[in-house]
Amino acid sequence: MAVNLVNVENVSKVYGTRALLDGVSLGVSEGDRIGVVGRNGDGKTTLIRMLARLEEADSGRVTHSGGLRLGVLTQHDSLDPEATIRHEVIGVMADHEWAGSAKIRDVLTGLFGGLDLPGFEKGLDTVIGPLSGGERRRIALAKLLIEDQDLIVLDEPTNHLDVEGISWLAKHLQERRSALVCVTHDRWFLDQVCTRMWDVQRGDVHEYEGGYSDYVFARAERERIAATEETKRQNLMRKELAWLRRGAPARTSKPRYRIEAANELIADVPPPRDTSELMKFANARLGKTVFDLEDVGITAGPKELLKHLTWQLGPGDRIGLVGVNGAGKTSLLRALAEAAVSQGRSSPQPGRSWSARPSGWPTSRRTSPNSRPRCGSWRPCSRSVTGSTSARAGR
């Protein structure tokens, strides 16, 4: 029986308002070779960073077995720029010691093309600081592979490797006894190395047996089954709702268990994904424009808050006004509110040089300059607004 190395129990992680992982539970055992796939931004790197305890989860728990030897390759190395390649990769080993190790010779030859590191001017004595990101990446990978680990966690290991380097790395990992968790977009590499797949999507992680090709077929089958089950649920829901609506509305003799079963059918229906777009669609009948400002200026005494403002606000729009205190945020909102209140006004009130009339208001309807609006209240003040501000209320 394989020994469990890492346990992830009910882990959740939220960035801002987005839940990357929501109640995820996973495990890594000896001999596992796991590939992590998913769209960019879905949480693959976050998952393996929490797996390696490089990042804390918002909730849940990650446990490692006692004495676990863990090696991690992140997308940003932690190499000392003042050190040499020899110091970072070989350490304090004498030349005859590391040259006599088959594993070290294999790693240096596979990643650098030879024991003398032909791509570097001073070989092992090259200082790391001036090297490129790709060269530093290969050094960090060599340092990791030379050591002995129970579990290796790799984040995009094939980046900055040529075709020969990727082929060598796949063969090297196949021959190692260490467990492996790897994030990569290289499908060939996943097929060659991995025996299980983790698919990260919508805050959850789905597990599949086999390499990438097996995962593609298994995922397509899972989505087909899910679509079939959803179709059955929708049909049953329509039947149950039709049954509930049958008969007089005041009758309450329908079996309670049947009503509860109908409620369960719609209990797991997710909320609308984009409420703003739905609001726009629902309010479309109100017209194309709610507020239409053209060449508007707002002053407060001698101070000019806004000038030559042209702005159109549509139904369903959600706009935030920001600015320093006194910039005119509240004054603009008051101008919009009074434009909506002063419906049908044919001439401005004292202290105002603008007028507003809804597009749906009859053109023959007029109100006297001294009459109050039909709703709300109006009070002259020291502010003045110029330009054309209209509040439309089409159907």
Image: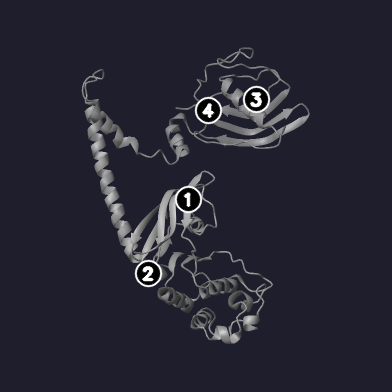
Can you give x and y, in whole percent of width and height, for residue 243 in the image? Answer: 22, 29
The residue at the point 68 percent across, 37 percent down is 323
- Nearer to us of marks 2 and 4 is 2
Identity, as a three-letter code, of the amino acid under mark 1? Arg
Of residue 389 and residue 185, the one placed in the foreground of this image is 185
Spatial distance from mark 1 to mark 2, Cα to Cα? 30 Å
- Indicate the quadrant containing the C terminus: top left, top right, bottom left or bottom right: top left
Mark 1 Cα-neighbour bin, 10 Å: few <14, some 14–19, many ≥20: some
Asked if residue 162 lies left or right of residue 264, the reply is right
Residue 72 visible to an observer of this rendering: yes
Sequence-first tag of 2 and 4: 2
Q: How much space separates mark 2 and mark 3, taking CA atoms? A: 70 Å
**CB contact under 8 Å: marks 1 and 3:** no
Figure check: 363 above or below 310: above
Classify 10 Å Cα crowding around label 3: few (below 14), some (14-19), many (20 and above): many
Q: Position of residue 48 (x, y in %)?
A: 48, 59
Instruction: First in sequence, mark 1 or 2: give its number.
Output: 1
Q: Can residue 115 be seen in this view?
A: no
Which secondary structure lies at badge 2?
helix
- What's the residue type where badge 4 is placed? Arg
Nearer-the-camera pick, 180 or 312: 180
The image's mark for residue 61 is: 1
Q: Do the residues labelled 4 and 3 touch (CB within 8 Å)?
A: no
Residue at the limit of the structure toward the front, as seen here: 66
Reading the image, the residue beneath label 2 is 191
Q: Mark 4 vs mark 1: which is more N-terminal?
A: 1
Q: Mark 1 or mark 3: which is in front?
A: 1
Judged left or right of residue 112, residue 33 is left
Q: Where is mark 4, residue-wise? A: 392
Which residue lies under the disc numbered 3? 354
